[in-house]
Image (cartoon, helix red, strand yellow):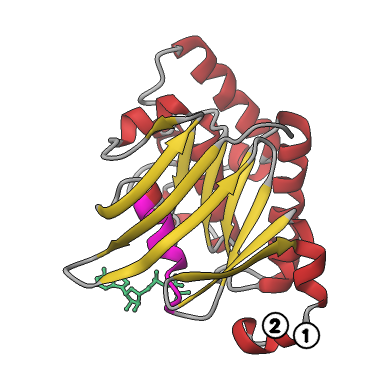
Amino acid sequence: MSGTLLEVEGLTAGYGAAPVLHDVDLTVRPGEIVAVLGANGAGKTTLLRALSGLIRTSRGRVALDGAELAGTRVEHLVRRGIAHVPEGRGVVTELTVDENLRLGGLWRRDRADARVALDEVYELFPPLAQRRSSAGHQLSGGERQMLALGRALVGRPRLLLLDEPSLGLAPKVTGQIMALLRDLRDRTGLAVLLVEQNVRSALSIADEGVVLSLGRVVTRNKASVLRDDTDLRHAYLGF
Ligand code: ATP
């Protein structure tokens, strides 16, 4: 883990005139899992949206490998190695599993490798291989989360922006998704910026955690330190 993959400096962003995020600084190194934590409304989802260009930033700098990302469109993000799995997962329910996965490779220049990556996703998620021709709306919550993750992985990201992967899932399925993320990180060097309400799950796989409150970073530390910091947990994380 050397160098910096994602570098965010002084990011200020929101939905209208009033910013939701204020002066956010953040770095993610290759192969690092960073959990973004904080109460409801702290700005976690807004942070991922600002990073992936879904909302405009009013101030600050976002760089990948030292080169600015501002104003970047989806196809450029994919080509530069960023994939965003939004809250609610963004699965196209009318399309089949296979069609959804192919969307993840749409912007890739290396068509041959997009096909290889698709096969790898089916190996990684056997339930998706069994349901290749099923429509998105026929899938369970866990299968939809696999599909959303799988679609992102077809793009061979170096950085995954992952919003609430545990939402609506049974604890066992959440545990499987977390284990899979850690495994992917170990095998491929994938870096993950992980937004999670389920703080225990997130800190169980994260290297570091960033705590947001009212759109500002109030602390950043090793996951093991945050897990043991009772005052911080009570003040910002609700457990
Ligand atoms: P949650 O876990 O509840 O999703 P969060 O930390 O992800 O919380 P955000 O969803 O980023 O928080 O919301 C931060 C603030 O931005 C909140 O005050 C929210 O009301 C506001 N907000 C979120 N989405 C929009 C939107 N589309 N338009 C205007 N304001 C929004």
Residue at (40, 14) in percent of width and height: 109
- Quick check: is 48 in the magenta stretch? yes
Magenta range: 41-50
- Quick check: is 30 in the magenta stretch? no
Mark 2 residue type: Arg
Asked if the residue at tag 1 contacts the one at tag 2, i.e. Cβ–Cβ closer than 8 Å, the answer is yes
Q: Main secondary structure of the magenta part?
A: helix
Q: Residue furthest left?
A: 17
Residue at (52, 30) in percent of width and height: 154
Which residue occupies the foreground of this view, 235 or 106?
Answer: 235
Disc 1 element: helix
Location of mark 1 (residue)? 230
Which residue occupies the foreground of this view, 183 or 28?
Answer: 28
From this viewpoint, is residue 88 visible?
no
Q: Position of residue 82 (x, y in %)?
A: 47, 36
Q: Considering only vertical position in the picture, is 81 above or below 181?
A: above
**Which numbered marker is on residue 233?**
2
- Which quadrant of the figure contains the N terminus? top right
Q: Position of residue 90 (x, y in %)?
A: 39, 53
Mark 1 residue type: Thr
